[in-house]
Amino acid sequence: MTIIREQDKKVESTAAVVSMVLSVVIFLITLAAGIVSDSIALLLDASMGFIIVFMAFMLRFSIQKIHMPPDQFFNFGYEKFEPFTAVIQGIAIVLSCVFSSYFAIQDIVHAEDIVRYDIPMYVSLFSGTVALLNAFFLRRISRATHSTVLQVSSLHWLMDGSLSFAMCAGFLFGFMMHRLGYFHITHYVDPVMALVLACFFIGMPLKLIRHNVRELLDATPSREVRSEIETIVEKHKARSFGIRSIRMRRAGEKVFLNVCFEIYGHTTMVQAQEFAESFEKDIAAHFPRYDVIVYFYPKSS
């Protein structure tokens, strides 16, 4: 188990470093192109890139923390750094969309054409390609390591890549309209494109925030996880007198479960220990990272 976790940690750390390097490169190129062309849509993409830069560094920090064992300050471990990081990332995306919408509306009210369309078009194509390739890379790693942090990061990269390709298409349209002389249309291409894309992408991070805030507040896990746990509990319930209480929560990849089984008073310590070990073995088969506390409430025969 320890060897597997160490391997996962190395793979996740490598993925975080790759994301850090790519995010810095894309951010600098996109920011420079946005300033040169005076494009609000490209500056929106740059702001998303800045968020990815920040989150890439935070991702690396979180991965190191998540795999640390419990200590005197964090008795239950550091797994909650995973949903915490996801919430911060979601809030950053939402704020980026809100600010970009504000500036886009300003540009619609005070219409002004961008300086040139060719530079934003090529830069958007480049950044979109790199972002999508890294998104698929992170998704593959997240599935192999069951990392929620990498899963959220891959979604962010996917959003940024899709945003870049959509902007590339918009810049291509603006370039064609500009060449044909439809200047009354080109004035609105950039801000309308930024506004539509911001409104479209704001929904996904809101869902991520809602889901991960539930974990931070120790809400019960998803219906699928609860169903699996309840099935295992019911399986072992037949060996006891009944169930007195069951509590569960999830923090990132780790599941915390407290179960109190009612047993007959004449049950020996050895029998109770065998019962608890059998139950934990079943939980471990479904949830590789778990923290289970099994205790018993004796009842008279």
Image (cartoon, grey):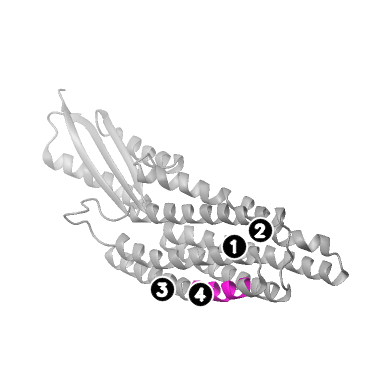
Residue type at mark 2? Answer: Ala
Q: Quadrant of residue 195?
A: bottom right
Give the mark nearest the N terminus, 2 or 4.
4
Query: Which mark lies nearer to you, 3 or 1?
Result: 1
Between the residue at mark 4 and the residue at mark 1, the CA separation in whole angstroms equals 18 Å
> Residue 146: where, in percent of width, then height?
42, 58
Using a 10 Å C-alpha cutoff, classify the residue at mark 2 as few (fewer than 14 neighbours), some (14 to 19) or many (20 or more).
many
Q: Are marks 3 and 2 in contact (CB under 8 Å)?
A: no
Q: From the image, which quarter does the C terminus lie in?
A: top left
Residue type at mark 1? Answer: Leu
Which mark, residue 189? none
Look at the numbered disc 1 and give the secondary structure of its residue: helix
Asked if the magenta segment contains residue 31, the reply would be yes
Residue with the mark numbered 4? 22
Give the mark nearest the N terminus, 4 or 1.
4
In this view, the residue in front, 198 or 161, is 198
Label the magenta part by its dominant secondary structure.
Answer: helix
